Image (spheres, grey):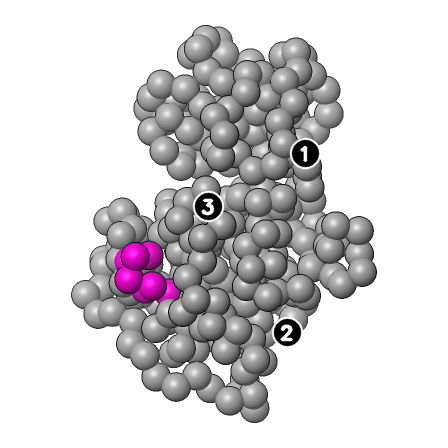
Amino acid sequence: MTTGTATTRTATTRAAVGPLAEPALVALDIDGTIATSGTLEITEPVREAVARVRAAGHHVVLASGRSLVGILPIADQLGIQTGWVVASNGAVTARLTLGAAGGYTLEDVRTFDPEPVLQRALALVPEVNLAVEEIGWGYRVLDRFAQGTVNGQQEMVPLADLWSVPVTRAIVKGPDVVERLLEPLRSLDVTAVPTAPDWIDVTPTRLSKATSLEIIRRTLRVAEHRTIAVGDGVNDLEMMAWASRSVAMGHSPDKVKAGADEVTGTLDDDGLVPVLLSV
């Protein structure tokens, strides 16, 4: 796989393979790839292309920085009722299961003690807002986040309640926190991923979408050369390095384009569609 330089070719359309072809694992980011960030809006061409790939016998795995509660409505819109999803940048791996409570079973959950991270953040940037994830429900928050910026419900709690139990993911939000806090937080042996200049997602150490996707690949017995990943964010770089074929959306930052084998159209162009039709 070519990495380190952005390619100029774009994904091209060819007929989807038939059901007798060797199954592929197609890992798809959500925000900026399938839907506009923070929304549930999916175009009909994207829905149809996902359905066509699945009908051909391939495995479509939603792999997102969103929490599980934010992924489930997207899966529902895509008609995916069974299969695997990767949530919280790899901290939560679940299997969509008909008849299960909530429609899923948790297959792998990675947690960490958020206290050192949150204490360090407050000490260095006292004005930060903090949150920790509760799987399938939402977040416990220090102060309420703006509507639509986190998935699920929110409960305001005292500071100490944010680290009362191990968590899958913590959020650190505040002015220029990436510049001011990213390296100090990473020094605490956690995975800290910037999603905006004022936002850092923190998950357990040595964790990414790719670590969960590899577990899923082995479970499904998909060949390594039949792995495909499409995304647009910095948190997709490990997933792109893992995949045999990686595709960056056309609006991706240059760093993401440089980490991909191909560059397709933008979200507004339904750039995901030709990639899916070429699986």
In the rendered view of the protein, which quadrant contains the N terminus?
Answer: bottom left
Q: Is residue 103 magenta?
A: no
Instruction: Looking at the picture, tell me which residue is in the foreground, 146 or 107.
Output: 146
Q: Element at badge 2?
A: loop
| Residue annotated with mark 3 | 39
In the picture, the disc for residue 221 is 2
Cβ atoms at labels 2 and 3 below 8 Å apart:
no
Q: Is residue 244 left or right of residue 86?
A: left
Q: Residue at x 55, y 16 (%)?
A: 143
Residue 18 appears anywhere in the view: yes
Residue wearing tag 1 = 134
Q: Which residues are magenta?
A: 266-272
- Identity of the amino acid at label 2? Arg
Q: Secondary structure at mark 3?
A: loop
Query: Eyeballing the image, is 3 above or below 235?
Result: below
The kind of residue tagged 3 is Thr
Q: Residue at x 47, y 33 (%)?
A: 149
Q: Earlier in the sequence, mark 2 or mark 3?
A: 3
Mark 1: amino acid: Glu
